[in-house]
Structure formats: structure tokens, C-alpha cells
Image (cartoon, rainbow, N blue to C red):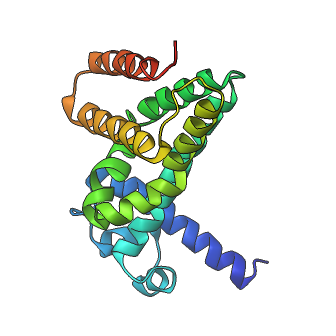
Amino acid sequence: MTTRTEQRERTRRTLLGVSRELFAAEGYGALGLAEIVGAAGVTKGALYHHFASKAELFRAVLAEVQAEVGERVAEAADARDDPWDQLTAGCQEFITAATDPEIQRILLIDGPAVLGWHEWRVLDEASSARHLAEALTDLIERGVVARQPVAPLAHLLSGAMNEAALWLATSGAPENVADTRAALSRLLESLRVR
């Protein structure tokens, strides 16, 4: 027998999973709450028990996607021993993750449009941008990257990678992924102290 708490959590997970699929496939603007609750097999009341609005539901889905991308980036970095290799592997994994159409749509296209840039950046700061700043700080302290303020550098790199990912999302040309990865490698390499 399941408890009420378990049932509530199962309903919440179902809503998040179904919403994620629908947001990725149709986009936030094209999707109504009736379609979400119908696909999830729940009532609007059940949805409103967990999320006050469609925007709040989307925010939860976006946070989940951002956390997953952050985990992928961290796993790619952690698979390397050398701090420089960790940075480059993590950055390249972000580009790889961002080629997933589901991630592109939710994280890069609808995310900033639905939540606004400020709130989107706050969520980004809590996930992958924080890891990037930590990696850059470590590399500066080790003398691998020239001493400089970390915040502007981290924002520049994060912005460049986000813009590249957005471009890849709309370019429709698979060969652009390899070119983007090569350009990112050259950009990162230019930061290294010789």
C-alpha cells in the first residue's frame, strides 16, 4: 500500500516527466495545461497542488534539465586527472549536451524566453556556471591560466558556449558541431599560459 506522500511524489514526478517531453516536443508557448494533465492522467487540481502555474511547472522542468547538464559536465571533467583537461572536457561536454534537441528547446530557447534572462541566469549560475568559475579559479591559482578576475572570464566563456549552443540549435547542419568544438578548443587554448 502506498502512502499519501508516496502518491503525491509519484504524481509530481509524472507531471515533471510528461511536461518535459511535451515542452521539448511542442515548446512552452504551444502547450496548454489541459494537454499536460491529459497526458499525465491527472486533474488540473492535482497539477495545481504541486505547481501554481504552467510557468512554475516549466521552471521545475528547466531546473531539472540544468541540473542534468551540470552533472554531465561534471562527470566529463571528473573523468580526467589534469585540471586543464577537466576544464576542456567539461566545456566540450556542454556543447555535446546542448546538441540534444530536448535540452536545446527547454534550456536554451524556451528557458530565457519564459523565465526572462535574469531568472534564467540565476538558475544557470547555480549549476554549470558555478562549476566553470570554480575550474577557472583553480587553473588561475595553479598558474595554468593568467591571473585575472574570474567572474568576467567565466561569464564570457559561459556566454560564448551558450551562444554557440543556440546557434547549433538553429543551424540544422551537423558538420557545425565539429567546427564548434574545434573553435571552442582554440578559444580555451588561448587562455593557457605558455
Residue at 70% over, 81% down: 5
Q: Seen in the image, is 32 located left or right of residue 125?
A: left
Count of numbered circles in the view: 0
Q: Nearer the viewer, residue 42 or 73?
A: 73
Q: Is residue 74 above or below residue 21?
A: above
Q: Residue 66 location in percent, x, y? A: 49, 51
Q: Residue 53 location in percent, x, y? A: 37, 80
Note whether residue 73 is visible: no
Residue at 66% over, 28% down: 142
Q: Residue 137 location in percent, x, y? A: 59, 39
Q: Is residue 85 above or below residue 54?
A: above
Q: Seen in the image, is 150 located left or right of residue 161?
A: right
Q: Nearer the viewer, residue 146 or 156?
A: 146
User: Based on the displayed image, in which of its 4 quarters is residue 185 positioned?
Assistant: top left
Farthest residue, direction top: 194
User: Based on the displayed image, in which of its 4 quarters is residue 89 positioned?
Assistant: top right
Note whether residue 63 is visible: yes
Q: Nearer the viewer, residue 68 or 14?
A: 68
Q: Residue 25 location in percent, x, y? A: 31, 50
Q: Is residue 85 above or below residue 48?
A: above
Farthest residue, direction right: 1
Residue at 32% over, 66% down: 115
User: Based on the displayed image, in which of its 4 quarters is residue 4 positioned?
Assistant: bottom right
Residue at 23% over, 22% down: 173
Q: Nearer the viewer, residue 180 or 84?
A: 84
Q: Seen in the image, is 143 located left or right of residue 54?
A: right
Q: Quadrant of the N terminus?
A: bottom right
